Amino acid sequence: MVRLISTILLMGFIAACSTNAPTQRGGPSGRYPDNNELPKGDQGVQRKIGNPYKVAGKWYYPKEDPAYDEIGFASWYGKDFHGKKTANGEYFNMNALTAAHKTLPLPTFVKVTNLENGRTLILRVNDRGPFVGDRVIDISRRGAQLLGFHKQGLTKVRIQATDENGTVLRPSRRQPAPIISTPEVVEVVTPAEEVQKQPPVQSFAHYIQVGSFSQRANAESQVKKLLKTGHRARVERTSNGAASFWRVRVGPFIERLIAEQRLDRIVADGFYEARIFSEAVN
């Protein structure tokens, strides 16, 4: 009888544990979204505006902005952050419909229109960024695919604040830039003229320099920190004539756009002084 009672209690305990145990998708709240999903609801975290913060020497001031309507450049991010927590504690799935913005409350729903092809998509802003150049929004890889700029990496978009259903909260009078197809101008030239018009092509290698140190041990320590966040870097020795320095670099990258995308990820991981350096290739 004692064994029977013990067995029943043990089975009940196991059942309770299996019911309350976190799932591999982020726990009972389901914070890790499914592929192709526009996450809705609280996703297990509280909505927040966020405090002012500083990245690479620049201050950002999050705020409520229900009439938000802006035109600018969009980029996208993917596997480097896949499965990691976003700025508001949700989990990033590069195949879900989410985005990063520098100042909108988390989360905020936005309608994004690709002004180069007219495609429109509703996204959930649950992360901070991008912090490179003049970009205004960083979109999940799947979002970029659906908007049609995954292969080119960058596109001009219009972003409007909406509710969960994609209804623009406060329509403005802004008119989106027209999608214009520029007529192709064909110029006929002789082979001699063609050679004369073509300037020599200069190739460049692009590096992301994360730091420069007077002690090699400090540079190697920085490399280890980068590796923990998924960025492989190496130490290079350089000299200014009077002294030697050890710089920590990621790269090289053939295309500057790819270097800028990686720089955005590195800065978002906390390496705020990272910069791109381009060097001519002979």
Image: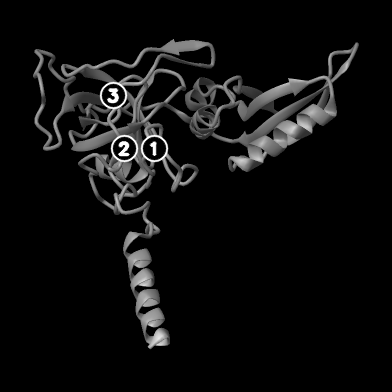
Mark toward the start of the polypeptide (1 vs 3): 1
- Say whether marks 2 and 3 touch (CB < 8 Å): no
- Distance, label 1 to label 2, CA atoms, is 7 Å
- Tell me which residue sits at (20%, 18%) in the image: 68
Residue 162 rendering spot, x and y as whole percentages: 15, 28
Tag shown at residue 119: none
Left or right: residue 38 versus residue 241 is left
Residue 209 position (above or below residue 89): above
Residue 246 rendering spot, x and y as whole percentages: 80, 25
Residue 49 rendering spot, x and y as whole percentages: 31, 21
Residue 282 visible in the shown view: no
> Disc 2 marks which amino acid?
Val
- Tell me which residue sits at (31%, 54%) in the image: 28
Asked whether 90 or 184 is in front, the reply is 90
Q: Which residue is mark 1?
A: 89
- Distance, label 1 to label 3, CA atoms, is 13 Å
Q: Residues within 10 Å of mark 3 (few under 14, many from 20)?
A: many
Task: Kindly give the residue lying farthest to the right in the view shown.
Answer: 242
Labels 1, 3: front one? 1
Q: Which residue is mark 3?
A: 105
- Which image quadrant for residue 102? top left
> Disc 1 marks which amino acid?
Gly
Residue 42 rendering spot, x and y as whole percentages: 24, 39
Q: Which residue is mark 2?
A: 45
Q: Quadrant of the N terminus?
A: bottom left
Q: Secondary structure at mark 2?
A: loop
- Say whether marks 1 and 2 touch (CB < 8 Å): yes
